[in-house]
């Protein structure tokens, strides 16, 4: 399994946002209380993160994304905080996508949604 390159920074704390995996199935009725039950015992969390990269770091990121994790299809190891402190988790890019924006000075902001096995 690939590991997040040590030459790339950790995600920024601003914009860091998570959502627990949907393990519950809910059935609403015309009258009376809705019924809820567990559908899964383990479900990945969704985590929205962003990174600020220099031009050279952006090139490293794109090579990692394309070559090491199969254009975002494969899981990789990355240190994240999903409520238990900084720990290493398996993560992958949701739908193999990320967004990027260039900033003054040839810096880049990359934003992505990750599936995180917690």
Image (cartoon, rainbow, N blue to C red):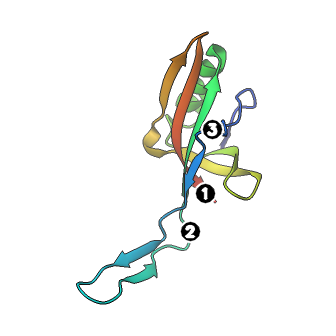
Q: Which residue is most to the bottom?
A: 32
Query: Looking at the image, do the residues carrying marks 2 and 1 touch, with CB atoms under 8 Å apart?
Result: yes
Q: Nearer the viewer, residue 112 or 89?
A: 112
At 52% from the left and 17% from the top, the residue drawn is 102
Q: Position of residue 59 (x, y in %)?
A: 60, 18
Tags 2 and 3 touching, CB below 8 Å: no
- Residue 62 appears in the picture as rendered: no
Disc 2, SS: loop
The residue located at (57%, 52%) in the rendering is 18
- In this rendering, the label closer to the viewer, 3 or 1: 3
Residue 39 visible somewhere in the drawing: yes
Query: 113 or 64: which is nearer to us?
Result: 113
Mark 2–mark 1 Cα distance, whole angstroms, equals 8 Å
Residue under numbered circle 3:
14
Say which element carries label 3.
Answer: loop
In the image, residue 74 above or below residue 68: below
Q: Disc 3 vs disc 1: Cβ atoms closer than 8 Å?
A: no
Q: Is residue 57 above or below residue 69?
A: above
Q: Nearer the viewer, residue 26 or 7?
A: 26
For the residues carrying marks 2 and 3, which lies nearer the camera in this image?
3
Q: Which mark is residue 42?
A: 2
Give the CA separation, mark 3 to mark 1: 22 Å
- The picture places residue 66, in percent across and down from the top left corner, at 53, 29
**Which of marks 1 and 3 precedes in the sequence?**
3
* Label 1: how many Cα within 10 Å (few below 14, some 14–19, many 20+): some
Residue plotted at (65% across, 17% down): 54
């Amino acid at each position: 399994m690939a590991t997040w390159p040590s030459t790339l920074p950790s995600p920024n704390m601003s914009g860091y946002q998570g959502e627990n995996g949907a393990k519950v199935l809910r059935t609403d009725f015309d009258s009376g209380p809705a019924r809820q039950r567990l559908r899964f015992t383990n479900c990945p969390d969704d985590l929205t993160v962003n990174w600020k990269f220099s031009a050279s770091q952006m090139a490293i990121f794109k090579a990692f994304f394309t070559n090491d994790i199969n254009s975002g299809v494969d899981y990789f190891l990355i240190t994240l905080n999903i409520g238990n402190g900084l720990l290493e988790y398996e993560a992958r890019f949701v739908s193999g996508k990320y967004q990027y924006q260039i900033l003054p000075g040839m810096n880049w902001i990359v934003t992505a949604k990750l599936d995180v096995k917690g």
